[in-house]
Image (cartoon, rainbow, N blue to C red):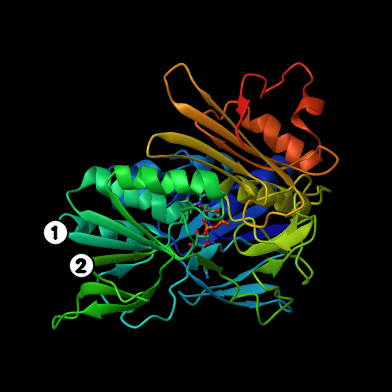
Amino acid sequence: MRHLIIGNSAAGTAAAEAIRERDPAARVTMLSKDTAFFSRCQLHLVASGRRSSAKTRFVPRDWAQRHGIEVRLGVEVTGIDAHQKQVLCSNGEILPYDRLLLSTGASSLMPPIAGMEGPGVFGLRNLEDAEGICGQIMGCKNVVVIGAGLVGCELAEALIKASHTSVSIIEMAPYPLPLQLEQHTGARMRQLMGEHGINMICGDSVSAIERNAAGNPCAVALKSGRILSADLVVCAAGVRPNIDLFAPLGDIGRRGIPIDEGCRTSVTDIYAAGDVTESCDNTLGRVMPSAIWPAARRQGRVAGINMSGGSEALTDHTGLKTSAVLCGIPLVSLGPIFDLNPAWQKQIYEHTDSRGRLCTKVCYTQSDGSLAATVLWGDVSLAGLYAEAIVKKRSVGDLSPGIVPDYRLQAVG
Ligand SMILES: Cc1cc2nc3c(=O)[nH]c(=O)nc-3n(C[C@H](O)[C@H](O)[C@H](O)COP(=O)(O)OP(=O)(O)OC[C@H]3O[C@@H](n4cnc5c(N)ncnc54)[C@H](O)[C@@H]3O)c2cc1C
């Protein structure tokens, strides 16, 4: 059996390992236009010069050899012939397959704003982006980051820590991390980032990037009329799935390649996993992308098992889980914080921990008492239990009667 995997990141590597576990004799070939194995989750550290590109490698040096995977890096797949069961590569090679996995991920979304194209404006998705930012940051006075999602906030914090540059973030929502935080914690994060020296501008958006005579960015114009000096701009305004290879062949959803519980696409013997897909999120019961590393690993594993003749399904699948440490605060966000049902009851619990830090839990519960969504700020020690309660639609107390996690907290809202 010949397995071909496109992509060498979270989903692709998990699939390759799963195939090899089940089928020692299978031929497994991995193709990627990336020239290295690297964790995208660490790109903000590379961009700020705090970590070398080499240190972001997430598989051991002998990974391919150990698993018997033929890896070809720096090779772009330019087309798929699903009838002949073969792929066409940028180097002119044509490679046959019996089973194909698309784990092509996503690319930075660069909105069509005047001045967006050209030098000095970056996305943050690849090593080249991160190395490009790093190469310019030391000569910069003003950086503007578009979008205060997780990528934008982590980058802004890393840049402010590592350089003498002023850093501004522009966010359309009224507070940063609008997908992960609600009003209470969002307002607190906005203030905290300000205290850390980041110029956080919320409720506004970029209308144009202005360039000087040399063609480099010199300012960013906002819808409100404000003008910010900027000699480097990073666009962290979301991603778009890399669906182009599959689009001529099979069904494409609103936000990715639709897959079933076994990570099968609508085309026989073609599977898909990771950020390129959309699938049913068990927390929300809705089809959506699950653009986080652990979900891509899980989908890759399920795809790999099924490609090699097994029978595995995505269960308790959700991308609505974020954990991060921002401005020194551990944070966990679980469930559809960006799409709250007004019927859910909201409670905010706060306590001060032994280090004097204010810890907050924001809990949204349904009428039957089950947990629907939560934000943990500061104390994230019970995150696993909260996550399980949300996916299983239970209350935290039901799952673990021995633990009454909020007993020592004071309900403040
Ligand atoms: C800056 C940043 C920070 C992040 N932080 C976190 C975090 O803290 N926690 C978290 O859970 N997630 C985080 N994420 C998201 C996480 O990185 C992704 O969910 C994960 O990388 C998805 O893995 P994937 O395998 O689906 O695709 P990707 O990682 O996007 O990889 C896609 C692969 O496909 C290859 N490819 C694409 N098209 C072709 C082609 N035509 N031919 C050949 N190869 C091709 C690419 O070269 C690449 O190897 C972050 C992402 C970014 C960008």
Taking 184 as reference, is 279 above or below it? Answer: below
Secondary structure under the numbered disc 1 in the rendered image: loop
Along the horizontal axis of the image, is 212 left or right of 207? Answer: left
Q: Position of residue 157 (x, y in %)?
A: 33, 46
Q: Which residue is mark 1?
A: 139
Disc 1 or disc 2, which is closer to the eye?
2
- The quadrant of the image that shows the C terminus is top right
Q: Residue at x 75, y 67 (%)?
A: 265
**Residue position marked by numbered label 2 in the rendering:** 231
Type of the residue with mark 1: Gly
Q: In the rendered picture of this protein, how many numbered marks are placed on residues?
A: 2
User: 32 or 281, which is in the foreground?
Assistant: 281
**Amino acid on which disc 2 is placed:** Asp
Question: Callout 2 environment at 10 Å: few (<14), some (14 to 19), or many (20+)?
Answer: many
Nearer to us in this view, 262 or 6: 262
Who comes first in sequence, dot 1 or dot 2?
A: 1
Q: Position of residue 12 (x, y in %)?
A: 59, 54
- Pick whichever, 18 or 188, lies toward us: 188
Q: Residue, x 42% and y 19% (percent of image)? A: 355
Q: Using the image, determine if residue 92 lies above or below residue 350.
A: below
Q: Nearer the viewer, residue 160 or 184?
A: 184
Do labels 1 and 2 touch, CB within 8 Å?
Answer: yes
SS at mark 2? Answer: loop
10 Å neighbourhood of mark 1: few (<14), some, or many (≥20)?
Answer: few
